[in-house]
Amino acid sequence: MERPLIFAANWKMNHGPEEARAFAQKFLALTSAVEGRSLWFFPPAVSIAALSETLGNRPDVSVGAQNVHWEPKGAFTGAISIPMVMEVGARLTLVGHSERRHLFGETDEQAARKTRAALNAGITPLVCVGETLAERDGGRTEQVIVRQLGPIFQALQPGDWAKVLLAYEPVWAIGTGKNATPDDAAQIHELIRLELGRREVVQRVPILYGGSVNSGNVAFLLSRPQIDGVLVGGASLDPAGWAELIEQGSRSKVRPSGGYDIIAG
Ligand code: PEP
C-alpha cells in the first residue's frame, strides 16, 4: 500500500481559540478534501476544541495536541493528559518536538513514555527526532537519531508501529529559514527507515520532514519518495499561506491510495 501524503501544521504558542476559529473558517473555504492527502493541525491545547469544532467533519482534516503527559491524571501542575486532549477533539499528538526537548528538557525516555501512553489511550503519536547544529557539525547526526529512537523501540512492540508516525526535524532548520536540502532530508529518512527495518518494523511508518518548509521549497522536498509529508511551523500560521503551501506540495505527488488512518475516533 502506498504511504499517504501529510501536511501537518504546528502552531506552537500561536492562535488562541478565537484566532483558531477565524483561521479554520478561512482555511476551509480555500481547500477541499483530496483523496490520499491528510491535513493535520497542532494548535495550543486551549484551542483544540475551538479548532476541531470549526473544522467540523472534513474527513481529511484532524486536530492534535502539541504535547501531553504520559499519566492520565494526577499531581502534575501545568501538564495536560491524553484523555483530556481527546475529550476536546484531539486525535493525534506530537511527541518529542525539539522545542520540548531543548527548551523544556524533555528526554528521550520521556518521549518514549508519551509515545507508549498515546498508543495505550488510542491517540496517534507523531514522534519528532533531529540533531542540533553542533551535533551535525560534529558528524553525529546518525548517532543522535539512533539514540533518540532507542527508548521508543524499547517501549513499543513491532506491531505498534502501524499506528506511529515519525518526523525528522533537524533542530538547526526549525524556525531559522535554513532547510535541509531534499538530498540531506532523504538521506536521514533512509537511515530512519533502515533502523525501522532492522527491528522488523512495518515499512509503512510515514516519515515527515520539518524545518523551514515553505511554499517555495515544499514541492522539492516532497518530490523525494522518502518524504511522506511535512511538519510546518511558521508557514502554517496564515490560512492563505498554509493553503498555498498545501497546494504547491500536493502538485509534486498525491498518493493514489488512501489517507492515513489515525487510530482515535
Ligand atoms: C516545527 O515547529 O516543527 C517547525 C518545523 O517549524 P518551522 O516550520 O517554523 O521551521
Image (spheres, helix red, strand yellow):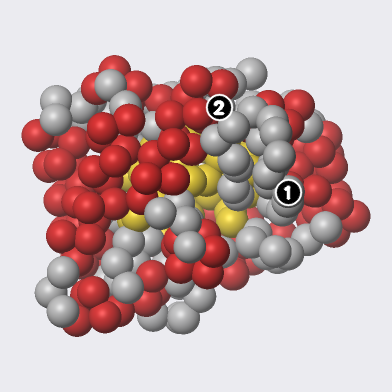
Report helix, strand or loop for mark 2.
Answer: loop
Q: Residues within 10 Å of mark 2 (few under 14, many from 20)?
A: many
Viewer-nearest of labels 2 and 1?
1
> Badge 2 is on which residue?
123
Decide: is 183 above or below 57.
below
Horizontal and vertical percent for residue 247? 54, 54
Mark 2 → mark 1, Cα distance in angstroms: 22 Å
Residue matched to label 1: 77
In the image, what residue type sits under mark 2?
Ile
Label 1: few (<14), some (14–19) or many (≥20) C-alpha neighbours in 10 Å: few
114 in relation to 167, above or below: above
Q: Relative to residue 145, is residue 233 drawn left or right? A: right
User: In the image shown, does 153 or 123 lie closer to the viewer?
Assistant: 153
- On whether ligand 1 comes within 8 Å of the CB at mark 1, the answer is no
Q: Is residue 49 above or below residue 25?
A: above
Q: Are marks 2 and 1 in contact (CB under 8 Å)?
A: no
Q: Residue at x 36, y 50 (%)?
A: 108
